[in-house]
Image (cartoon, rainbow, N blue to C red):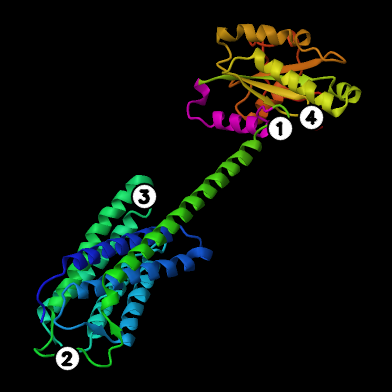
């Protein structure tokens, strides 16, 4: 009854199988990163696209071996075969798309997917009701089932392995896997076709409601277009979600940076300085990298702020911050600790390259004029590890006032293990 293979239909069936396999891999990878609220929509879409693609490949492949009479199909069984393909695909994608899946779940997904393909295939073949029942070859039937199981296992394994891949590499890997999967799907189909023969003289049943004419190239073109549109829309959604995620990550990073930045001057703030100190002191070789803290406080801050409006006072602080920043080299960490206080963290403070900076800091009263009144400075300094080995001790020690002219002169710096700030008293 079967004379030859129709090459255009065989080619069309393979193309549809490739698109169906690519869609399956695409959605399988996507499901691993979809939020719970959107997961059902992606799962239903993936199951419909993949199941319809495999189902279409089957019927186009059926027509690739033309018979002596017009091929017809039972409507109910044809619909059930499509439903089996869609449901099994959706369940398999659901299982494999889980964040974690062990051997048992993987085996269940493989059996569900291969079982759906086998049921779809043989229901679809049986939907081609004839006046005499078909005869099955047990060997070819077994081989076709084995191919379905192996193809499903390979598809699901590849889907999980490339789920985390991005960009061109992921697309290339997915296409290569889709080609291999399509070969396996077509191999299962055409092997299954060999497993079934009809007795001589059998004719299509009179009750068959579907003619095979529209289930060839027209169905293949329609399904190929559907799968292509599905993947395109899904890819567009993925790019959109990634762009939104990148924007959110950038905004989160910006907010995190603001938590460590003084909004008025743009300098690191108190939290940033304390974190810098903690990180530096936590280093294993911290004692091999001494540093100094230089404390600069505007002693007449209240007078200045009382005599200027807020906008003018803000400009004064900004000018002061810029002037101090210009006095120090890039290696020095400058932070605004409070409204009136600045700290300089000077690594390897004894380095002679800082001599000019220390000299200019000692002349700070002359270097930073203001429109209304001159700035009066209060200064102090501490060094690690001589003055203390904790951020609290170093900060407190630096806040003990000293003559502005002593900045950068550490040779006579007193070592005080429990510094007391002006206005504070010890217990008792």
Q: Is residue 249 visible?
A: yes
- Residue 283: in magenta span: yes
In front: 141, or 190?
190
Residue 150 relative to residue 358: left or right: left
Residue 22 position in % (x across, y down): 32, 59
Q: Does the CB distance between marks 1 and 4 fall below 8 Å?
A: no
Q: Quick check: 379 above or below 144?
A: above
Q: Earlier in the sequence, mark 1 or mark 2?
A: 2
* Disc 3 from disc 4: Cα separation: 63 Å
* Of labels 1 and 3, the one closer to you: 3
* Of labels 2 and 4, the one closer to you: 2
Residue at point 65%, 29% (across, down): 268
Q: Which residue is mark 1?
A: 263
Secondary structure at badge 2 equals loop
Q: Which residue is mark 4?
A: 426
Q: Quadrant of residue 11?
A: bottom left
Residue at point 79%, 29% (across, down): 426
* Disc 1 from disc 2: Cα separation: 83 Å
Q: Earlier in the sequence, mark 1 or mark 4?
A: 1
Q: Which residue is mark 2?
A: 133
Q: Earlier in the sequence, mark 3 or mark 2?
A: 2
Q: Which residue is mark 3?
A: 165
Secondary structure at badge 4 equals loop
Residue at point 78%, 23% (across, down): 315
Q: Quadrant of the image for the C terminus?
A: top right
Which residues fall within the magenta stretch? 266-288
């Amino acid at each position: 009854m079967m004379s030859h293979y129709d090459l255009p239909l065989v080619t069309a069936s393979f193309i549809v199988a490739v698109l169906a396999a690519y869609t399956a891999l695409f959605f399988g990878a996507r499901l691993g990163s979809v939020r719970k609220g959107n997961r059902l929509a992606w799962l239903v879409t993936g199951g419909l696209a993949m199941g319809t693609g495999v189902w279409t490949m089957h019927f186009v492949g059926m027509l690739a071996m033309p018979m002596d009479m017009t091929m017809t199909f039972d409507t109910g069984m044809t619909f059930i075969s499509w439903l089996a393909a869609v449901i099994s695909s959706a369940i398999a994608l659901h299982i494999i798309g889980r964040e974690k899946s062990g051997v048992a779940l993987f085996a269940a997904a493989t059996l569900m997917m291969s079982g759906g393909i086998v049921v779809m295939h043989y229901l679809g073949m049986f939907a081609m009701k004839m006046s005499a029942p078909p005869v099955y070859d047990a060997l070819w039937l077994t081989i076709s089932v084995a191919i379905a199981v192996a193809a499903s296992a390979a598809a699901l394994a590849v889907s999980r392995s490339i789920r985390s891949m991005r960009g061109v590499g992921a697309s290339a890997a997915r296409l290569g896997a889709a080609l291999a999967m399509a070969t396996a799907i077509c191999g299962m189909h055409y092997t299954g076709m060999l497993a079934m023969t009809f007795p001589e003289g059998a004719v299509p049943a009179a009750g068959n409601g579907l003619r095979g004419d529209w289930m060839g190239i027209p169905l293949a073109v329609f399904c190929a277009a559907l799968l292509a549109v599905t993947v395109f829309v899904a890819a567009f959604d993925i790019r959109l979600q990634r762009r939104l995620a990148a924007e959110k990550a950038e905004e989160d990073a910006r907010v995190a940076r603001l938590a460590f930045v003084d909004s008025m001057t743009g300098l690191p703030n108190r939290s940033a300085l304390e974190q810098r100190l903690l990180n530096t002191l936590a280093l294993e070789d911290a004692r091999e990298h001494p540093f100094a803290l230089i404390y600069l406080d505007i002693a007449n801050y209240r007078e200045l702020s009382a005599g200027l409006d807020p906008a003018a006072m803000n400009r004064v602080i900004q000018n002061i911050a810029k002037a101090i920043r210009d006095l120090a080299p890039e290696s020095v960490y400058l932070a605004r600790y409070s409204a009136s206080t600045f700290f300089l963290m000077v690594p390897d403070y004894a380095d002679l390259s800082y001599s000019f900076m220390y000299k200019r800091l000692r002349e700070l009263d002359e270097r930073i004029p203001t429109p209304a009144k001159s700035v009066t400075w209060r200064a102090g300094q501490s060094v690690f590890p001589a003055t203390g080995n904790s951020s609290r001790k170093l900060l407190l020690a630096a806040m003990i006032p000293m003559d502005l002219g002593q900045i950068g002169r550490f040779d006579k710096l007193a070592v005080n293990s429990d510094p007391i700030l002006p206005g504070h008293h010890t217990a008792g």
